[in-house]
Image (tube, rainbow, N blue to C red):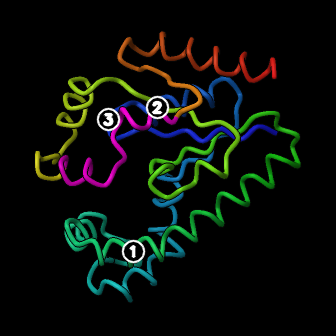
Amino acid sequence: MIVIGLTGSIGMGKSTTAKLFAEEGVPVHDADAAVHRLYAGEAAPLIEAAFPGTTAEGVVDRKALGQRVLGDPAALKRLEAIVHPLVRKSEAAFLGEARRADAPVVVLDIPLLFETGREAQVDKVVVVSAGEAEQRRRVMERPGMTEQAFAAILARQTPDAEKRARADLVIDTSKGIEAAREQVRDVLRALERH
């Protein structure tokens, strides 16, 4: 089984690209979706204990939590120490299931792949990219996004140029969804040949 680590900076089209892999029949583990599930379940009491007042009715209030950790590296490290092991547990269960199903290829959608040193744990790294102007346009269209929040997010992420240089393959989403879909198919065809 070939494990693809899919990553890309905010606004580059990584989530859309993950969906394109799924549409091609490839099992995808979405780290962000796992975090959403954990915030409504297993992680909520742990986060409330570490950051009192950040949950409501047993569910993490993402906005309240974000305000507590944004710009506070120590708080962010505490949060990651709670969440990352739980996401890895979810990922391990996903990989076990995929192996039992004899999936030839799987995708681990990991936003902070390079930042957390996870590239060594996958067979191929695919970086999704779109160019700086397109990235800014997409991100600033998000509800509630501010220049300050965008800058804080970018500060935590490995620069796009470095990600591209370290990637095995790059998918450029700046040319639209159909071009991205064809690039996903090219990636899968290339992996089939190996």
Q: Residue at x 53, y 53 (%)?
A: 31
**Residue at the disc numbered 1:** 79
| In this view, 4 is above or below 144 | above
Circle 2 SS class: helix
Q: CA distance from mark 3 to mark 1?
A: 23 Å
Left or right of 141? Residue 163 is: right
**Residue at the disc numbered 2:** 165
| Numbered disc in front, either 2 or 3 | 2
Name the kind of residue labelled 2 in the image.
Ala
Q: Quadrant of the N terminus?
A: top right
* Chain-order first, disc 2 or disc 1: 1
Q: Which span of residues is magenta-colored?
A: 150-166
90 or 131: which is nearer to us? 131
Q: Residues within 10 Å of mark 2 (few under 14, many from 20)?
A: few
Q: CA distance from mark 2 to mark 1?
A: 29 Å
Q: Residues within 10 Å of mark 3 (few under 14, many from 20)?
A: many
Name the kind of residue labelled 3 in the image.
Gly
Circle 1 SS class: helix
Place of residue 65 in the rendered image (x, y in percent of width and height, measured from the top left): 28, 71
Circle 3 SS class: loop
